[in-house]
Image: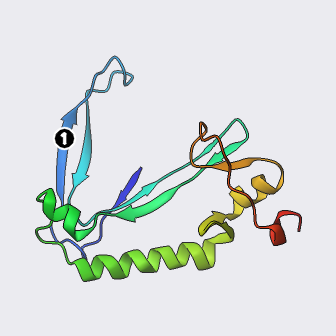
Amino acid sequence: MLQLWSPSVMADLAITRFSIDPAACEGHTFRFRIDGGGLLQLYFGGVCDRVITRSHFGHQSKSRAQAWGQDLGVDWNALSRLSGRIQRHIRNHLAAAKTQSCPILCKAFELARSGFELKLSTQTPWAYALPPDVADA
């Protein structure tokens, strides 16, 4: 996951240091995270055993952030505008095709056309189908 912050959405950003188990993390004892209701998240999928898993871009809703007490200092209109710009860029400039309203990025599209499956996760029992007009093009 990658969290994105814009000062146009939230002027203040909380950075928190937290401990981790050095035995599980090659001797490292801490990491940092950023916190706030106006952050954007990009969850990266990947490739494993001829399966391409889905990536996701999103952010908190105002009502969820309010329920968690994370809504202070967030310009929700700016967040909506920024999110829309990023989503349109992904759909209109980075995607080679789409399936079930999900954009397929160029490399994933190339791999899918060569026989890789497009799935939510490697364990998902079904796969997305490429649109018939581009599957064999």
**Is residue 107 left or right of 9 when viewed as pictured?**
right
Which residue: 75% across, 61% down?
Answer: 130
Q: Is residue 40 above or below residue 78?
A: above
97 or 42, nearer to the observer? 97
Which residue: 35% across, 82% down?
Answer: 81
**Colouring:** rainbow
Q: Quadrant of the image for the C terminus? A: bottom right
x, y (%) of residue 103?
A: 61, 67
Amino acid, disc 1? Arg
Which residue: 37% across, 25% down?
Answer: 25
x, y (%) of residue 47?
A: 65, 43
Q: Furthest-top residue in view?
A: 23
Q: Furthest-front residue in view?
A: 125
Q: Is residue 84 above or below residue 137?
A: below
* Callout 1: SS: strand
**Is residue 12 left or right of 52 when viewed as pictured?**
left
Disc 1 designates what residue?
A: 17
Which residue: 20% across, 67% down?
Answer: 63
